[in-house]
Amino acid sequence: MKKFCLSYSSGKDCLLAMDRLIQAGNQPVALVTTLSDEINRSWFHGIPISVLEAAAEALDLPLVISHNNETNYTEKVVEALHETKKLGAETVCFGDIDIEQNGAWDRQVALSAGLEPQLPLWQENREALVKEFLAKGYTAIIKTVSKEAGIPIKFLGEPLDEIFITYLKEHQLDICGENGEYHTLVIDGPLFKKRLNYYTSGIYESTYAYSLIIDA
């Protein structure tokens, strides 16, 4: 049994990765997430701190936040990982699947912080992972859709389910969204002590994507 922190994005892959490590007998001690200094929201998923804190409470885990920007991103993540060692972390869990650049970065920051990197989903079948996530009883909503992927904005706020998966298949899009086709927010499941309560207030359009504006 090892104690670990989770690189937490709020999405399905990191939750499934944490679930697997727990099922293997390991113990989570913290969630680690990155917050952009520029927009005061999480990188990539655009989650505000209110929702991150509510999710940490729902998962009953401490939240360690790395405040950073494009120039000091890696340095600040390593600092945050160091903080989790004070909580007992021996390893750090990542939800990346098979993009080598991401996996290499995961290993780099973990080792730089003196932690063992763990990638429980690495090199596994993407569709099988989504189906495992749903079969375990997790609930996630579609938080962001990529303009390049062409996913209709009508899916924003809708559940990650067979309807959405079928759409992705029919349009030959990555089932897991590993290339940024879409992002999710997990709101309930076996590891949650209570459902994550949130509210929406519109849709934000950036250069590359449409994203649901949420708060808690």
Image: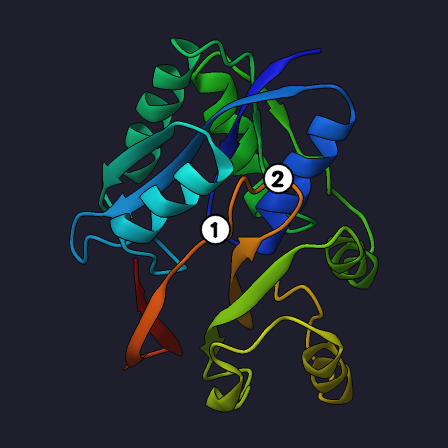
According to the image, label 1 marks what residue? 10
Q: How many labels does the image show?
A: 2
Camera-near label (1 vs 2) is: 2
The image shows residue 96 at horizontal and vertical percentages of 62, 46
Most foreground residue, 172 or 184: 184
* Residue shown at the point (29%, 34%) measured from the top left: 66
Q: How crowded is mark 2: few (under 14 residues within 10 Å), some or many (20 or more)?
A: some
Q: Which of marks 1 and 2 is nearer the N terminus?
A: 1
Question: With 28 as the anchor, is 153 left or right in this view?
Answer: left
The tag on residue 191 is 2
Q: Which amino acid does label 2 sit on?
A: Leu
Q: How crowded is mark 1: few (under 14 residues within 10 Å), some or many (20 or more)?
A: many
Most foreground residue, 64 or 44: 64
* Residue shown at the point (50%, 27%) measured from the top left: 108
The image shows residue 104 at horizontal and vertical percentages of 58, 36
- Which colouring convention does the figure follow? rainbow
* Residue shown at the point (76%, 77%) measured from the top left: 162
The image shows residue 137 at horizontal and vertical percentages of 73, 54
